Image: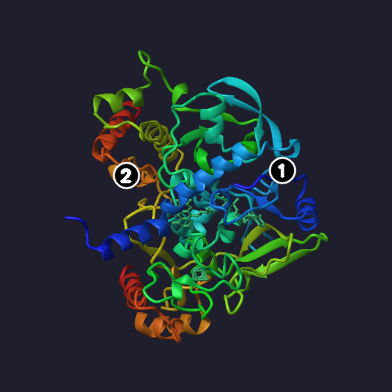
Amino acid sequence: MKAFSFERASSAQAAAARAAEVQGAKFIAGGTNLVDLMKLGIEAPEHLIDVSGLGLDRIEETDEGGLRIGAMVSNTALSADVRIRRDYPVLTRAIAAGASGQLRNKATTGGNLLQRTRCPYFYDTAQACSKRVPGSGCSALTEGAFSRQLGVIGTSDACIATHPSDMAVAMRVLDATIETVTPTGMTRRIPLEEFHLLPGDTPEKETALMPGELITAVTLPAPVGGIQRYHKVRDRASYAFALVSVALIRQPDGSGRVALGGVAPRPWRLAAADAELPNGARAVMARLLDGARPTEETQFKITLAERTLAALLLEE
Amino acid sequence: MPPPIEFELRRRTLLAGTAAVAAASVARLAHAQEQAGSAASAQQQSDIALTVNGTEHRITVDNRTTLLDVLREDLHLTGTKKGCDHGQCGACTCSVNGERINSCLSLAVLHDGDDVTTIEGRGAPGQLDPMQAAFVSHDAFQCGYCTPGQIQSAHAVIGEIRAGIPSHVTSDLTAVIELTEAEIRERMSGNICRCGAYSNILAAITEVAEDQA
Ligand SMILES: Cc1cc2nc3c(=O)[nH]c(=O)nc-3n(C[C@H](O)[C@H](O)[C@H](O)COP(=O)(O)OP(=O)(O)OC[C@H]3O[C@@H](n4cnc5c(N)ncnc54)[C@H](O)[C@@H]3O)c2cc1C
Ligand code: SF4
């Protein structure tokens, strides 16, 4: 690991200002993704700014009847909050389906949204990967590459990685918005749907955040009710990343919302696909995965996504 | 018979995907070399205070040092184990301010003022705590390497269920969570046991949970 200097931020705005001004600076929250990547030499910050002591660890009610989740609320605390369990159960389900008890105690709301892909070639510094080293190429798209964990839609010729978060898939189906503070002290609100960028020709650009910008909170609109489900399909029963996951909110009249994890560079949801819910899983997936470009190894995800949704629609 | 090459490759890549194990050993080497080669400048060190098993320690750490390495290398509390060093195996699990964490993925500088309990703080030969004793009486280990982490998680799992923290297998999110085998298994999934002592680990935890009920 490369040596780095360290400071504790005194306020959210000061943290953002420092991050923009100090060369090679990065925030650290729970550290469960960043420290891992630093050990592997994939991330090499020269300066770390600890943002864990800024009081951003509360969940408050908003004037609109929703919740404002501080960026430093741990995954455990968020999943266990009585308001989340009662009014946004899909979020509790998604968080509890991710990582392990130990990791969820440390993982934060902001850090979870910013965790990086689990593409095996991104993790192996001996392999070409344009996300890790811009312009170096994509090992996952070479002949005979292993792509089982990778994406089928929203991907590009430059990168087929997925965003690995479970939490984000539930937040997407709940129409969450991200709140930030910029280095100049401005507050920004970014809808989650616009937060993670599609790779295009620049897979190294992953989010809409500007340099130094700090996530301060995630807001959820007022509860929408309905039956809320999160189903994660993975290679073992617990403690593995999703091959496919489905977040579903279904209203008594059959309308609702669907978001997918494990298939795209961001939680994958389309209004036109939501509108097909009364017509069943096949109709939804025909829209949602229209234009999918699976590899031979990820072809199964198309079928798996449809069947997972179909199974959820049968549950009542 | 060795597995067909394709199978072996797939297995390794899967490991890399979920675990990054192969890269990890290389990175550890590089890490050791870097640390040996360059004495960190003052800017790259920090003074921290840590309370471990009730004793306060004031130490200067290289900012790169993980909590796990401080416990083992600086405080010589080698009960907490280094397994994968990437948060995947759970051998490094210890309790910080009452919550279990992977000490390998947590930088020591982020723990200034924290209260840490390691396996040494749970009990000692002759005065085992109930969970340690139950692990012994149920043969809940073979080689024993994962055991300190298993015991730390075992304590935490009972506490997390009592505190009403839901898990992946909790059926009703608004009801009191029951202490079932399924709950314990799911919540212990962050602690891998290569000897496969899982069923005996489950028996040990169940016994302690029932005794405390
Ligand atoms: C073995 C293992 C298994 C896992 N399994 C799953 C799984 O199944 N599902 C899943 O969803 N996740 C899984 N995870 C990932 C885990 O959820 C993330 O590591 C965690 O959520 C990251 O949060 P953190 O606070 O530790 O982030 P950190 O590591 O502290 O930070 C991550 C990144 O976010 C930046 N950052 C942090 N906070 C802010 C902020 N407020 N504003 C701006 N930038 C910020 C940091 O600079 C860094 O770049 C797993 C992790 C491991 C190690
Ligand atoms: S899919 Fe993306 S992350 Fe994976 S090797 Fe290709 S460029 Fe890198």
Image location (x, y in percent) of residue B210: 30, 30
Image location (x, y in percent) of residue A180: 71, 61
On screen, A80 above or below B63? Answer: below
As helix, strand or loop, the secondary structure at mark 1 comes to strand
Q: In this view, does B146 lie to the left or right of A255?
A: left
Q: Say if residue A105 shows up in the picture.
A: no
On screen, A243 above or below B111? Answer: below
As helix, strand or loop, the secondary structure at mark 2 comes to helix
Q: In this view, does B144 lie to the left or right of A193?
A: left
On screen, A295 above or below B168? Answer: below
Image location (x, y in percent) of residue B93: 45, 37
Looking at the rendered structure, the kind of residue marked 1 is Phe
Q: Say if residue A181 shows up in the picture.
A: yes
Task: Single out the residue that lies furthest toward the front.
Answer: B37
Give residue B185's mark: 2
Image location (x, y in percent) of residue B4: 22, 62
Do discs 1 and 2 belong to a common subunit?
A: no
Q: In which quarter of the image is residue A113?
A: bottom right
Q: Is residue B20 left or right of residue A265?
A: left
Give residue A52's mark: none
Q: Which chain carries label 2?
A: B
Mark pair 1, 2: CA separation = 38 Å
Q: Mark 1 lies on which chain?
A: A
Q: Which residue is drawn at 63% across and 66% down?
A: A177
- Image label count: 2
Q: Mark 1 points at which residue?
A: A6
